[in-house]
Amino acid sequence: MAVWSQVDYGVSQSRVRQREAASFWVTTREAFWIAIETLSTHKLRSFLTLLGVVIATTTLIVVMSVVNGMNLYIADHVANLGTNTFILSQLKWAQGFQEYLKARRRNRPIRIEDYRFLRDQLADYKAIGAEADLEPQPNARFENHVIDEISLTGVTPSMIDIGQQKVAYGRYLTDSDQQHASMVCFIGQDLVDKFFPGRDPLGHDILIAGVPFTVVGVAEKIGTTFGESQDNFAQVPLSTFQDKFVGRPELNVSIQAWDAQQLPELEDEVRSMMRARRHTPYHEDDNFGINSSDTLLTVWQNLTGSIFAVTIGIVAVFMVVGGIVIMNIMLASVTERTHEIGIRKSLGARRRDILMQFVIESGVLAAVGGLAGVVLAVLIAQVVQVFFTASVPLSGVLVGVSLSTVVGLFFGIYPASKAARLDPIEALRTEN
């Protein structure tokens, strides 16, 4: 008998759980369709109810989209120094103004001797190259065509393996060009479009700052960064640059590691060698700068983090306002449906059934507002993408919808508990 009692008890408990699950599903489904019906029946009221949630969700996702788009843009166009590459230069990038002023007084430029020292003494690296820019930017001329300003850079031949430039046709600068200070140049697409429309530029001479150079190669098109063309350039051998323009140029030395694991070790090795070469005491700061993509990305992420923190504050205000409006509307809904609640209770609905119904209804209302905000944010992001840059992250969509739903559930608790506590007799006496 005891065994049969335990079996009956187990079956009974199983049936209770099944009934509870079925009841929960029915309550959830009913609350969902009641919420949808309320939205469709009272369109203007629903729009005003959800306006705060829509604005908050839209603001959050648009800001996340712009920040995400900018992160991708910065990584691809600004902080793209080359794979596993860092740059040794006079100054460290992206530092505070006071630190910059101190570094300008303290740091010495990187010279050709420093480049040769590292090239010959570094134990292990994949590639090393150097470049120097001419300031102010010179003009370029071919026949009757003139470009007032171009970026002229003296480079070592190894820069083709490190930098962004890739050969579209022709060739890059060679070791022979470097050794003989050849009067040759490698040019960007802007010069080709301006000087040689419909013509092959290879073998033609162009004047750069009044000095003739023979075009030996053309670079693949890079595009623009913040609206400024990256294809308006000419590169000449560093030895030629020294001979014709600046005898003792200030260099940026690019050093490429074999892989990401070796990169920090190589940075430390270069730092140690440069400090030893310059006899820098251990208690003094570096009198040079070592810069990597992470340097720029870290500064940028700190900036966008501040922007995002301000956005969170704005979103929080809108969400709270939207939640309060939803709570007031749900309180009005409870008042309107008091008689209905009385009928449901008289037919056996429990407090938690009523509570669940109104909480879910509030959550669904807010979730619909969140979805509307997502749609609006995607449209705005597409418009922003035309003029600037924006990329809608999936995480932004999930956060926006989830946050709006949680706000609806939270602010629906009070109206739902008020509905659940109604006395069925008093509720039935209420006239709609």
Image (cartoon, rainbow, N blue to C red):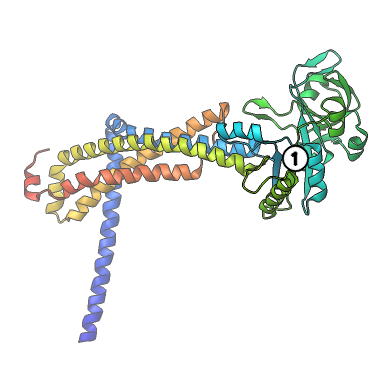
Picture residue at 71% right of the left edge, 32% below the top: 222
Q: Residue 313 sits in which quadrant?
A: top left
Quadrant of the frame with the C terminus: top left
Q: Residue at x 24, y 67 (%)?
A: 16
**Label 1 Cα crowd, 10 Å radius (few <14 / some 14-19 / many 20+):** many
Farthest-out residue, bottom: 1
Q: Which x, y percent locates residue 227?
A: 63, 25
Towards the viewer: 339 or 182: 182
Residue drawn at (62%, 28%) of the image: 226
Residue designated by label 1 = 253
Q: Relative to 272, is 218 on the left or the right? A: right
Secondary structure of the residue carrying tag 1 is strand
Q: Please report the residue visible at 73 percent of the width from the left and 50 percent of the height from the top.
A: 257
Residue 269: x and y, percent?
A: 71, 51
Amino acid marked by disc 1: Val
Looking at the figure, which quarter contains the N terminus?
bottom left
Q: Is residue 33 visible?
A: no
Report the side of 291 relative to 377 (left or right).
Answer: right
Nearer the observer, 100 or 106: 106
Can you say whether 394 is above or below 386 in the image?
below
Left or right: 270 as drawn, with respect to 3: right
Residue 15 image point, x, y percent: 26, 69
